[in-house]
Every structure is written in C-alpha cells, then in structure tokens.
Image (cartoon, rainbow, N blue to C red):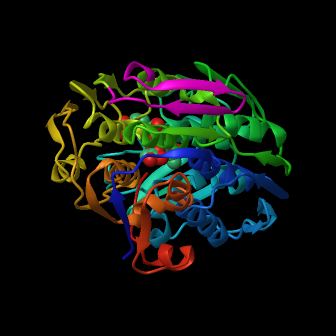
Amino acid sequence: MAKLVISGPNKLEGEVLISGAKNSALAIIVAAAMAPEESVLINVPRNLDVFFMTKILEELGVKVWFDGDGLHVDGSTLSSHQVPYNLARRMRASFYVAGLLLARLGVAEVPLPGGCALGSRPVDYHIKGFQNLGAQISIEHGYMKAQAASLSGCKNYINRSSVGTTVNLMLAASTAEGTTILENPAKEPEVVDLAICLNSMGARIRGAGTDVIRIDGVKRLRGTEHTIIPDRIEAGTYALAAAITQGRVLLRNVVTDHLRAPLLKLEEAGAIISEGPNELEIAVPQRMQAVDLETAAYPGFPTDLQQPFMAMLTLAEGTSVIRETIFDRFRFVDELRRMGADLKVERDTAIVRGVSGLTGAPVEATDLRAGAALVLAGMAAEGTTEVGGVEMIDRGYERLEEKLRALGAKISREGDEKDPEELARELDYLCP
Ligand code: EPU
C-alpha cells in the first residue's frame, strides 16, 4: 500500500487552488440522477469517494462520465432499486441513494451502513423521515427495504442537526405530493448547495441554511448545469498547514463566510488573516498560541477540521482543551503521541499541552481527516514521517501531495501507484 513520506520541518509559502467540496459533490451527484435527463456538474473534486459514488450510481443503471471540466450524470436509465452490499458498505454517503430511489422508483433496497472509524453513526433519523413521508420500511438481512406507491409531504423534526438526514429528505421530498417541512435541519453550506442545485432542476425548496426548510413537491425534475462550491474543509486544512509550518499561504477559490469559526480560532491562536474576493491569506510569523475549541454543527466549529487543528495545537504555546461533540475522532491521538505530542483524552475532551517540537515517525491514517492531520504534523516535525493508509486521504483530498509540494513541502508518495478504479475495488473502507 502507498504511503506519504515527508521530510520535515517544512515552511509552506505560495498559493493553492481549493477544489470543489467533496460533501457537496456526493449529495449533488445523487441529486443529478433525480432527473430523467442529463446534468453537468462543474468543479467536482476527483477523489476516491466521488469516484465511488459514480460506481454506485452506475450499478443502478445511471450513466455517469467525466468530460473535461464536467461530470455528466444522466438519470434517464435509472433502473435498479438494489444497491449491492459490497459497494454500499464502503462509504456511508451511499445511503443517499435511498432518497433518490424512493423518489424515482418508489422502492429502495439499500444496505444499512455498518461500523465506522468515527464511532457509532446510526441512520435512524433518515428512516424516521422516510416513514413520515409515507414509506413502508423494514430492516431485513442488513438491508433497509423501503416502499411507497407515492410519497406525501409531511412535517419532520430532525432530533439533531444531521447533514445526511437533511440531504436524504430533501431528495425524497422534492417530488413528493404536497409540502414537506424540515425543522432543525443541517445548515451546512453543502446543504444550501444541494438546495440551489435541486431548485435549478425545478424543485421548490426554500429556507436551506436556516432553521426550517420548506419543500413544495413538484411532479418531476429536469437536467441542469451546476457548479459545486469550494471545499471549506480542504481550505481549512491548507490554512492549518500554513499555521503549523509558520508559513504564509494564499488560498484561491474559497468562500470565506463558510470558514468563519475556524478562521476566528486561527486568529485567536495568532494567525494573521487577510481576505480578498474568493481568496484568503494566512500568515503565521511566530509560534501559535493555545486555544480551546468545541465542535458543533454549522456555523459552529466543524468536526472535520478538529483533527488537523489538534495537530497544529500540539506545537502551540500553552494548553488547549478540545471538545468533540459530533463523532468519536480522538482515536488518532496515539499516532500524534508517537511523534512527541503531549495529549490526554478523557471521553469527549482532549487536553493538548503544546510541545516545542515533534519528531518524524511512521504513522497510520485511521480515517480521512486524521490522515490530513498526520501529514500536517509530519511537515512540522524534525526528520522523516511516513504516513500509511494514504488511501484514506485520497478519499477526500484531491492531489494533496502535489498541492503541498507546490507550496514547498518535501513530500512524496511511495509504494503502489494505482488508478482510482483499482484502488476502490481493493479498499474495504467505510465512513465518512
Ligand atoms: N445522527 C444520528 N442518527 C442519524 C443521523 C445522524 O444519531 O440518523 C448523529 C450522528 O451520529 C452524529 C450527528 O447526528 O453524531 C451528526 O451527523 P450527520 O448526519 O450530520 O453526519 P453525516 O451526514 O453522516 C456528514 C459528512 C461528514 C461530517 C458530518 C458532520 C458527508 C458525506 N459526510 O456526515 O464528513 O463530519 O456530516 O458535519 O457529508 C468528512 O468529510 O470527513 C466527514 C466525516
């Protein structure tokens, strides 16, 4: 298996172009298949998860192909309602096709996502929402089997802000009869992007990004052309890469408003941030300072940046307290400890005592964002760091080492060079 080899310490300087948002793309690729016509999606990141979603849709009969800048999705040939276990089990977002299949075919057989490196991640809110829309649901042999002659608008209170539930219910309710209300939906920018895309396909969705989403069902959706928003988590990762290496990096193609909480925390920790139209510069002239943070649903501090932020804080001056409220994302701290970090974890809280230096070591990426965090730590550490499990990183970062190298990092990929199709076949991953 491939690994990333980093020779540190590095100081990052230069510009980096941020790719389209993975988590937007995963939802919107499925949304595009809601129309029995062709759609073109621009700015889709070419990462393993996106590739994997295209494979799942193809299995259902949808035509999906990259052509230049665009990912084309043609839902006119959608024919199967059964998602094979060996495909679905590798990626949780595969559960989005449940909303698609119920809306288009009135029937769906989708494997329930199983265990996850981020802890227990049930889909009970999704299922409750489908039932509220009128679907008959049974759980049989590890599959969710859902059926509905037609879906009817309904009122849904989502217990806890959930991106996946909001996505699935927006898909299913777009063509339901009557009006669906989603109370306490996720307000993440990726949900707003999905609503914009669905509306451009003829859906009538109001309130995405607020506390209540109203969906007036329409008879059918049509094809569209839609540009995916920039990836705020990728942007945050590069901002933290600048911070941990005390460098200066200009991020291009960013929506700064999507990054308010992490940027404020970076400023609190001593980074100098300048904003321009669609760009952002992070300069860190001296050692960062400790800060406390707690993850929360958007617009709170994103759980997806908690691990890279923790990597940065291992080198900050003073003691930081991090509370993780969304997932179990502290498992990778043992890897940081092997590099010399001083970390203590108690339940959902990590105490990070800043050390004056890290030392390179062989470490293993246990999940996508942990992998990014270890690469960041490796760039700041003295000596050689080898990050194994690089396929985890490839799930959500497009050309990570290439972009870092252009910023001056001494990073290379060693081991098997495989094309994404080959990799996806071999990998047995689940989450994010
Ligand atoms: N939850 C339930 N029941 C449900 C659904 C969610 O209890 O039916 C809980 C979860 O266990 C969690 C909380 O609600 O504690 C929020 O989970 P959410 O549904 O928002 O997460 P998700 O949709 O499974 C997406 C992203 C994750 C990101 C989270 C939180 C995608 C494909 N995945 O997951 O992205 O961390 O929202 O923002 O959009 C990543 O990119 O690294 C990643 C993990």
| Bounds of the magenta segment | 267-288
Q: Position of residue 101 (x, y in %)?
A: 64, 55
The residue lying toward the viewer, choosing from 247 and 63, is 247
- In this rendering, the count of numbered labels is 0
- Ligand 1: which quarter? top left
Drawn side of residue 344 relative to residue 357, left or right: left
Q: Residue visible at 36% across and 45% down?
A: 121
Q: Position of residue 125 (x, y in %)?
A: 45, 37
- The N terminus sits in image quarter: bottom left
129 over 179 or under it: above or below:
below
Q: Is residue 387 magenta?
A: no
Q: Residue visible at 34% across and 50% down?
A: 370
The residue lying toward the viewer, choosing from 18 and 215, is 18
Q: Quadrant of residue 183?
A: top right
Residue 218 seen: no
Q: Quadrant of residue 230?
A: top right
Q: Position of residue 39 (x, y in %)?
A: 82, 55
Drawn side of residue 61 relative to residue 113, left or right: right
Q: Is residue 278 magenta?
A: yes
Drawn side of residue 32 relative to residue 110, left or right: right
Q: Residue visible at 33% across and 38% down?
A: 312
Q: Position of residue 309 (x, y in %)?
A: 36, 36
114 over 253 or under it: above or below:
below
The residue lying toward the viewer, choosing from 126 and 64, is 64
The residue lying toward the viewer, choosing from 58 and 45, is 45
Residue 308 seen: yes
Q: Residue visible at 43% across and 81% down?
A: 416
